[in-house]
């Protein structure tokens, strides 16, 4: 299909299985940090068959990475209608995960294969792949580094030029490690991270790893649209030109533009 780049991100930390990670810290507990609520600005249709893993906004459209074996995709999605305008189906052995955009190239992680893919943004043609030694969960960038999560309490900063590890930071709320860091988005100098299996997004300092505040999105998807298949909150996209924040979840039938409110 295409050649893998001869590069690998190496870390010494062990990765986590799905079962073990469920027992780790997943919420702000007794945090004294600010907690933000939300106000819904707009609600848009979202493909309820999309197991959303990564989400970004660029040029008036959404780009989405979806998971599941044999069903993982890279998509270009019309915001207003939720229609899939363009799609690439990953080979069956790959489970799609996080997604980011860097200089006209889409970078998509996979979960347990420890392989990421780089695509031409316009054509979705795969350009090359790269290796990493942890699981792939979420990815974003701060205009200097790619920032990657693996479901633990660690964030990894990679060079976008050679995809090598530059540094890593541990994420804490005070002295409590915050694990299950999942889908990521860089917003106004902070890293937003979905906390897997919860309704919370952590706002993280990229310099120190300290959580600066929490976003509670409980009840965002109303009871009328909750189904047996609708899964957890996952998917954050930011429109930096119009200062718009979008969120959705796995198998959610809606995608929301929200404004944060201080509680």
Image (cartoon, grey):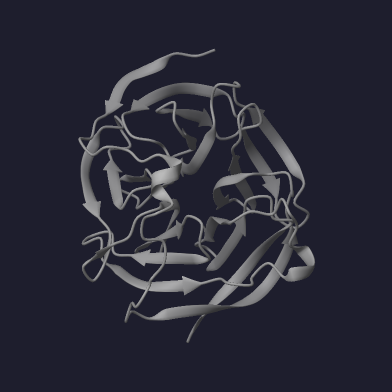
Q: Is residue 124 above or below residue 222?
A: above
Q: Is residue 58 above or below residue 129?
A: below
Asked whether 131 or 244 is in front, the reply is 131
Number of on-image labels: 0
> In the displayed image of the protein, which residue is found farthest to the bottom?
263
Asked whether 237 or 24 is in front, the reply is 24
Q: Give the x, y percent position of residue 121.
A: 56, 35
Q: Is residue 54 above or below residue 253?
A: above
Specify whether 21 is left or right of 249. Answer: left
Asked whether 18 or 172 is in front, the reply is 18
Residue drawn 54% across and 50% down?
Answer: 56
Q: Give the x, y percent position of residue 213.
A: 37, 74
Residue drawn 47% across and 44% down?
Answer: 100
Q: Quadrant of the N terminus?
A: top right
Residue drawn 35% across and 50% down?
Answer: 143
Q: Is residue 195 above or below residue 140?
A: below
Residue 137 visible in the current orientation: no
Q: Give the x, y percent position of residue 90.
A: 60, 26
Residue drawn 38% across and 67% down?
Answer: 203
Specify whether 25 is left or right of 67. Answer: left
Q: Quadrant of residue 210?
A: bottom left
Residue 241 visible in the current orientation: yes
Q: Give the x, y percent position of residue 49.
A: 73, 44
Asked whether 183 or 3 is in front, the reply is 183
């Amino acid at each position: 299909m295409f050649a893998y780049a001869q590069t690998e991100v190496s870390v010494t930390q062990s990765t986590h299985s799905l079962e073990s990670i469920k027992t780790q810290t997943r919420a702000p507990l007794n945090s004294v940090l600010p907690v933000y609520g939300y106000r819904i600005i707009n609600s848009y249709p979202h493909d309820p068959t999309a197991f959303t893993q990564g989400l970004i906004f660029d040029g008036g459209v959404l780009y989405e990475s979806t998971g599941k074996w044999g069903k993982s995709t890279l998509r270009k999605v019309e915001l207003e209608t939720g229609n899939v305008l363009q799609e690439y189906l990953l080979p069956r052995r790959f489970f799609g995960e996080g997604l980011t955009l860097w200089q006209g190239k889409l970078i998509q992680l996979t979960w347990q294969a420890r392989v990421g893919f780089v695509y031409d943004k316009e054509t979705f043609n795969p350009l090359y792949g790269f290796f990493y030694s942890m699981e792939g969960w979420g990815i974003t960038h701060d205009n200097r580094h790619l920032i990657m999560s693996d479901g633990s309490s660690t964030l990894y900063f990679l060079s976008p030029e050679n995809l090598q590890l530059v540094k890593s930071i541990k994420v804490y709320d005070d002295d409590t490690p915050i694990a299950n860091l999942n889908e990521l988005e860089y917003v106004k100098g902070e890293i937003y991270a979905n906390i897997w299996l919860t309704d919370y997004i952590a706002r993280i300092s990229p310099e120190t790893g300290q959580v600066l505040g929490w976003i509670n999105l409980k009840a965002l998807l109303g009871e009328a649209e909750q189904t047996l298949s609708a899964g957890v909150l996952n998917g954050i996209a930011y429109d930096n030109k119009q200062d718009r924040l979008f969120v959705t979840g796995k198998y959610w039938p809606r995608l929301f533009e929200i404004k944060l409110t201080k509680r």
